[in-house]
Image (cartoon, rainbow, N blue to C red):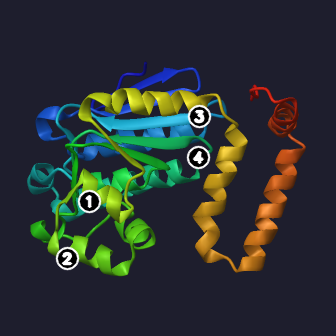
Amino acid sequence: MTDYETIRFERTGAVARLTLDRPTAANGLDATMGRELAEIAGLCADDPSLKVVTLTGAGKFFSAGGDLKGMAAAPNGAGEYVKHLADDLHSALSSFARMDALLLVAVNGIAAGAGFSLAIAADLVVAAESASFTMAYTRAGLSPDGGASYYLPRLIGLRRAQELMLTNRTLSAADALEWGLLHRVVPDAELAATIDGLAARFAAGPRHANANVKKLLLVSSDHTLEEQLAREAAFITGLADSEDGREGISAFLAKRAPSFH
């Protein structure tokens, strides 16, 4: 376990567990949390032995988003404060999106603003039944950050993205699942066990194959069909000759469980 001021960071085998840990401030992202999140995300992205990163919040909130009190009290003005915070958050999101390890988010409560943005940027999102989601930016006279304008239209379409961002509608976990923002909703008491079970499953899985899935999906909307087909062919060819590829094929033919590297 590595000590940080605002994030609990634990490592067990191929799994890293992150917990946003400012429960008395609704796990709001202040300058320290932004800096620590960027640093931790970079460490995870640079770790070739890591297969899974889980992220959740301490207490009743996942995250209420940017810390407005910190913005208001910033000695050099809110603009400079927000610029540094957004830069750190966006650095973390970029690292999470491009790292080989999968990011699994367990939304344990309210996810608002940048907390909402952070939650939906995951590779798999599981929410407790009591969780809720709201953009909330324009309510404070601000516009979205944290990749919301990238992910939301791709996940739920332009019209629904406009509604969330402009009206600050709050979605229940059930609504968010129906809209396509989540992969699964579970009873509150089962959230931790569910995310741990998924982490264990992926920790035993093929790291490079899962990483290639992330890479293919990240750029799929930027390529023509033929360009994407060529990328798919190159990726699967490389994996077929890899240690995991050989093991996976052999295990499938032998009708046994694979033992991936």
Q: Residue 58 at what x, y percent from top left?
A: 24, 31
- Front position among marks 2 and 1: 1
Task: Give the Cα distance between marks 2 and 4.
Answer: 32 Å
- Front position among marks 2 and 4: 2
Q: Determine the image quadrant of residue 82.
A: bottom left
Residue at numbered disc 4: 99
Q: Residue 253 at what x, y percent from top left?
A: 87, 35
Amino acid on which disc 1 is placed: Asp
- Front position among marks 1 and 3: 1
Looking at the rendered structure, the secondary structure element under dot 3 is helix
Sequence order check: which comes first, mark 2 or mark 3?
A: 2
**Which residue appears farthest toward the front when viewing the image?**
255
Image quadrant occupied by the C terminus = top right
Residue at numbered disc 1: 175
Amino acid on which disc 3 is placed: Phe
Amino acid on which disc 4 is placed: Met
Amino acid on which disc 2 is placed: Leu
Q: Is residue 8 visible?
A: no
